[in-house]
Each structure stands twice: as structure tokens, then as C-alpha cells.
Image (cartoon, rainbow, N blue to C red):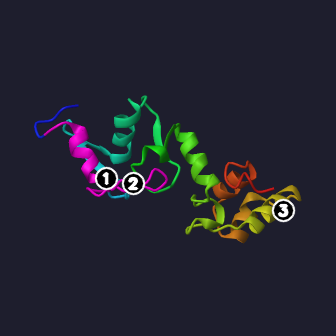
């Protein structure tokens, strides 16, 4: 990756505020709408942390994510980055409590307690229609709770 105004390394690293190896190295350049650093190379915009990975560790396989151990979207410290699948990235987010899973979702209508009640009442013979009316959700939402596609972690 070469460009008229210089090699990528010479354009990229001056926009990173590198500190100690333990600290985050924030991207000081342009950001994406969702808070990641953005860098243009070879006529394309890409995430700065992905460029940091490629410059220090080599190519990123197709379909693989560059994830942050530090959860800092602007961090370009290679020691804070790791490769993972979409599932790895999602699991990391959930493990660190950053997902909007369950009651943390601002749009949620059900609670852990109501999910337990829905399942108990369904076993006792309540219909999807009556459960939906009682809990203020659709019959489809009730079905997803009952087949554990939604709220599957609730016992």
C-alpha cells in the first residue's frame, strides 16, 4: 500500500498518540459515525485499528474482526488488539457487560421475572394470545420467549 503523499506507516503513526505498551494508543485523526478511528489508504476508508493490526501483525483474513481487549474504539495499540470471528466479538461484548441484552435494552418490554411467569403460565395452559395481552407484547414475542430464541438464558 503506497500513496503519492508517502508510505502508509509515515502517514498513519503520527495520528496515533502512542504511550506505554500497557496504555491505550488513541487515534487522533478522523472518526467514523460510530466512534472508530478512520484512515484512508489506497482510495478507501478503513478502521484505524485494522490498519494498526496490518502494519504490526500482517494481513487480516477475510471475514475476521480486529477486536479490542480494552474496549476503546479509538485504541490502536497492537497489544490491545486480537483477531476473532463475529461470534468471538459478540461473546467478548457480552462477557464484558456491554451488550443491550435483556433488561439493559432501553426498548425492552419484558423483564426476567415476566419471562419466567410467561413460561410458567404457558406450561399451565395459558394461550399465546392471553399471555401477549397480559404482558403488552405480540404473540410472536411470546413464541420467541417460549422457544428460547429470545431470553434463552433465563431459567
Q: Nearer the viewer, residue 113 or 30?
A: 30
- Which residue is drawn at the image coordinates 33% and 55% (left, top)? 27
**Residue labelled with disc 3:** 121
Residue 139: which disc?
none
* Proximity of marks 2 and 1: CB atoms separated by less than 8 Å: yes
Q: Is residue 8 left or right of residue 78?
A: left
Residue at 46% x, 34% y is: 64
49, above or below 36, in the image: above
Q: Which residues are magenta?
A: 6-32
- Give the side of residue 96 with respect to residue 24, left or right: right
Of residue 108 and residue 88, the one placed in the foreground of this image is 88
Rendered location of residue 93, percent (x, y): 57, 52
Q: Name the residue: 21% across, 42% down.
A: 10
Q: Which mark is residue 16?
A: 1
How far across and how far down the image is residue 40, in percent?
23, 44
Which element type, helix, strand or loop, lies under badge 1?
loop
> How far apart are labels 3 and 2 at the CA level?
52 Å
13 within the magenta span: yes
Q: Are marks 3 and 2 in contact (CB under 8 Å)?
A: no
Q: Say above or below: 96 vs 51.
A: below
Q: Determine crowd level at label 1: few under 14, some 14-19, many 20+ residues with C-alpha closer than 10 A.
A: many
Secondary element under disc 3, as helix, strand or loop, is helix
Residue 107: x and y, percent? 56, 67
Q: Could you tell which of marks 3 and 1 lies nearer the N-terminus?
A: 1
Q: CA distance from mark 3 to mark 1?
A: 56 Å
CA–CA distance in space, label 2 to label 1:
6 Å
Residue 120 at x, y = what percent? 85, 60
Instruction: Indicate yes or no whether the magenta region holds residue 118.
Output: no
**3 and 1 marks in contact (CB < 8 Å):** no
The residue identified by callout 2 is 25
Which image quarter holds the C terminus? bottom right
Of the pair 40 and 117, the residue shown nearer to us: 40
Amino acid at each position: 500500500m503506497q500513496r503519492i503523499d508517502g508510505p502508509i506507516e509515515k502517514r498513519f503513526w503520527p495520528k496515533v498518540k502512542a504511550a506505554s505498551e500497557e496504555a491505550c494508543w488513541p487515534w487522533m485523526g478522523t472518526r467514523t459515525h460510530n466512534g472508530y478511528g478512520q484512515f484512508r489508504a489506497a482510495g478507501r476508508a478503513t478502521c484505524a485499528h485494522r490498519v494498526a493490526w496490518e502494519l504490526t501483525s500482517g494481513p487480516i483474513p477475510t471475514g475476521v474482526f480486529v477486536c479490542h481487549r480494552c474496549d476503546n474504539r479509538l485504541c490502536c495499540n497492537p497489544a490491545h488488539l486480537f483477531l476473532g470471528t463475529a461470534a468471538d466479538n459478540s461473546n467478548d461484548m457480552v462477557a464484558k457487560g456491554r451488550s443491550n441484552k435483556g433488561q439493559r435494552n432501553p426498548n425492552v418490554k419484558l423483564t426476567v421475572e415476566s419471562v419466567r411467569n410467561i413460561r410458567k403460565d404457558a406450561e399451565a395452559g395459558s394461550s399465546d394470545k392471553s399471555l401477549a395481552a397480559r404482558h403488552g407484547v405480540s404473540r410472536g414475542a411470546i413464541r420467541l420467549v417460549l422457544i428460547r430464541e429470545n431470553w434463552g438464558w433465563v431459567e
